[in-house]
Image (tube, rainbow, N blue to C red):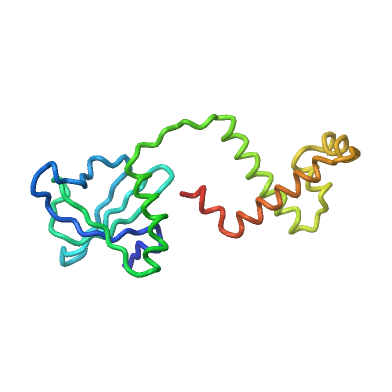
């Protein structure tokens, strides 16, 4: 079986060596809040540490001689301009896996986000089926609400359908990856 971590998640390359003293250690696996899987290659010279938190995942492609159950020193390697371009996303995932997830979001905000995503999908489907904005609004908001607002001067339902369609198009263009983690 072949598995390429670069396809699945952001990847950081690093060298891990044993720390000479506990004070020099800057890498201890027990500090991570994420679930951890360690994959070893056949020779034992390179391994991959896969971190998976609730919303982020990261692969740490590691070489070195450190034991993973003891404090170690880590040096991150970035190769070329492509590596430098990918590094911010990978380090953001690294930090997210290091930190415990805090549930500080207001549940109402989450419900609003879910409704917006739902409406984005409805708008996309309606647009693909050839429905006009009023028909899409009827599915999103109901017939009564659409009829009442459609006759108003500023027509908020039409604007809501436009925004939902824009969100849907952004999801199709790759935005869905943000909430897949």
Give how far across and how far down residue 173 sits, in percent: 60, 60
133 sits to left or right of 50: right
Identify the image quadrant of residue 90: bottom left
Which of the image's four quarters has the N terminus? Answer: bottom left
The answer to whether 120 is drawn above or below residue 61 in the figure is above
Please report the residue visible at 63 percent of the width from the left and 45 percent of the height from the top: 117
Please report the residue visible at 69 percent of the width from the left and 53 percent of the height from the top: 166
Q: Residue furthest left?
A: 20
Give how far across and how far down residue 176 sits, in percent: 55, 53
The answer to whether 35 is drawn above or below residue 108 in the figure is below
Give how far across and how far down residue 78 sits, in percent: 31, 63
Identify the image quadrant of residue 14: bottom left
149 sits to left or right of 105: right
Please report the residue visible at 16 percent of the width from the left and 63 percent of the height from the top: 44
The answer to whether 4 is drawn above or below residue 23 in the figure is below
176 sits to left or right of 34: right
Give how far across and how far down residue 102 sits, in percent: 41, 33
Identify the image quadrant of residue 96: top left
Please report the residue visible at 79 percent of the width from the left and 44 percent of the height from the top: 137
Q: Please tell me which residue lies in front, 29 or 147.
A: 29
15 sits to left or right of 106: left
């Amino acid at each position: 079986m072949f598995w390429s971590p670069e396809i699945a998640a952001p990847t950081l390359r690093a060298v891990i060596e044993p720390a000479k003293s506990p004070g020099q250690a800057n890498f201890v696996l027990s500090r991570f809040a994420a679930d951890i899987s360690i994959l070893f290659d056949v020779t034992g010279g390179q391994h991959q540490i896969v971190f998976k938190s609730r919303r982020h995942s990261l692969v740490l492609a590691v070489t070195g001689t450190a034991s993973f159950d003891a404090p170690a020193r880590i040096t991150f390697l970035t190769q070329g301009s492509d590596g430098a371009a990918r590094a911010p996303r990978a380090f953001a995932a690294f930090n997210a896996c290091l930190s415990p997830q805090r549930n500080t979001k207001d549940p109402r905000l989450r419900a609003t986000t879910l409704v917006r995503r739902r409406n984005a999908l409805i708008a996309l489907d309606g647009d693909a089926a050839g429905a006009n904005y009023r028909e899409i609004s009827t599915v999103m908001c109901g017939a009564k609400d659409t009829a009442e607002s459609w006759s108003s001067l500023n027509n908020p339902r039409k604007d809501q359908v436009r925004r939902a369609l824009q969100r849907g198009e952004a999801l199709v263009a790759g935005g869905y990856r943000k909430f897949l983690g």
